[in-house]
Amino acid sequence: MASSARETSRAFSAALNRLSYLDERSWESQKGCALKILFIGDIVGSPGRKIVHERLHDILEQRSIDLCIANGENAASGFGITPRLAEELFASGIEVITGGNHIWDRKEIFEYFPHEPRLLRPANFPDGSPGKGLLVAWAKNGTGYAVLNLQGRTFMTPIDDPFRAASQQLAAIPPEVKIILVDMHAEATSEKQAMGWYLDGKVTAVLGTHTHVPTADNHVLPNGTAYVTDVGMTGPHDSVIGMEKQGILQRFLDSMPARFSVAEGDVQMNTVLIDVDEATGHARSIDRLNFRLD
Ligand code: FE2
């Protein structure tokens, strides 16, 4: 390797190490051609965890997936995630877990964040919040990648501006890292679409989460960014967005407090598979893949 190339390699590795978790593999082995990324929609409660546990390893192997990311903010009975559940999801083959508005529901997760950079919370939470919203790491084939977690503000808690936060976070990613996945956790379709257009050509994918309803608008934007308004839900679809119907219905009917519990029927895993040109970081395709427990 020429000395200038070595210097570039060292600078790249140093920059990545400052940002995030990395293993000790050398830059020499970081070469590949294409990357297949599976993004799993919001994992809800024990049914969502069960289908991930039972199906994911085979899916990753059979489809030669290089990188698997999931939104896990509803993994603990529909509200939040605990350190134990995060560990279980990592052991299932998920390499990065993203969050959203429920990320703080379980207090024990506060202390876990500094020890586990693969668990993200939205980057536009106010300064001082535990954890980070950006991870830069290596995929299994050795390619550098970044995952950025954002949260919308329309019909949600008015936290910091996700658009300016996105620009600030992208500026911190080393230019050698071409593959950048964005989880845009938001309620409003308009805000998610706007983020897709805002980041078109700057990131590999803008993937919507939070509504738990898969949308049929997966496509690649003109400048190479894969987009979908909502990946959907990994959990019980015989439900109201994952919860038992009766409690939700009662709440709408009488506006009285009601206990919500995770439903059980029709467990599905809603995902999108993104084929990425590793040289440019642009998406070649984004396809919806849905799996059932049986
Ligand atoms: Fe959410």
Image (tube, helix red, strand yellow):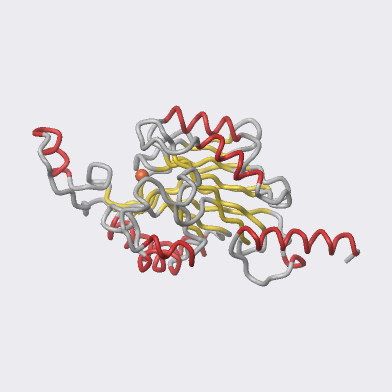
Q: Quadrant of the N terminus?
A: bottom right
Residue 230 position in % (x across, y down):
42, 39
Residue 75 position in % (x across, y down):
33, 57
Q: Is residue 157 left or right of residue 277?
A: left
> Given the current orientation, which residue lies at the most extreme right position?
2
- When asked about the image quadrant of residue 142, the answer is bottom right
Number of numbered markers:
0
Q: Residue at x 22, y 47 (%)?
A: 243
Q: Residue at x 14, y 49 (%)?
A: 259
Q: Nearer the viewer, residue 112 or 50?
A: 112
Q: Nearer the viewer, residue 180 or 151?
A: 151
Q: Using the rendered image of the protein, determine whether residue 54 is visible from the camera's viewpoint.
A: no
Q: Nearer the viewer, residue 136 or 284?
A: 136
| Above or below 232: residue 264 | below
| Above or below 110: residue 286 | above
Q: Residue at x 73, y 67 (%)?
A: 29
Q: Nearer the viewer, residue 130 or 58?
A: 130
Residue 116 position in % (x across, y down):
49, 65
> Given the current orientation, which residue lies at the most extreme bottom position?
24
Ligand 1 position by quadrant = top left
Q: Using the rendered image of the protein, determine whether residue 48 is visible from the camera's viewpoint.
A: yes
| Above or below 194: residue 264 | below
Q: Is residue 255 left or right of residue 242?
A: left
Residue 176 position in % (x across, y down):
73, 52
Q: Quadrant of the C terminus?
A: bottom left
- When asked about the image quadrant of residue 141, the answer is bottom right
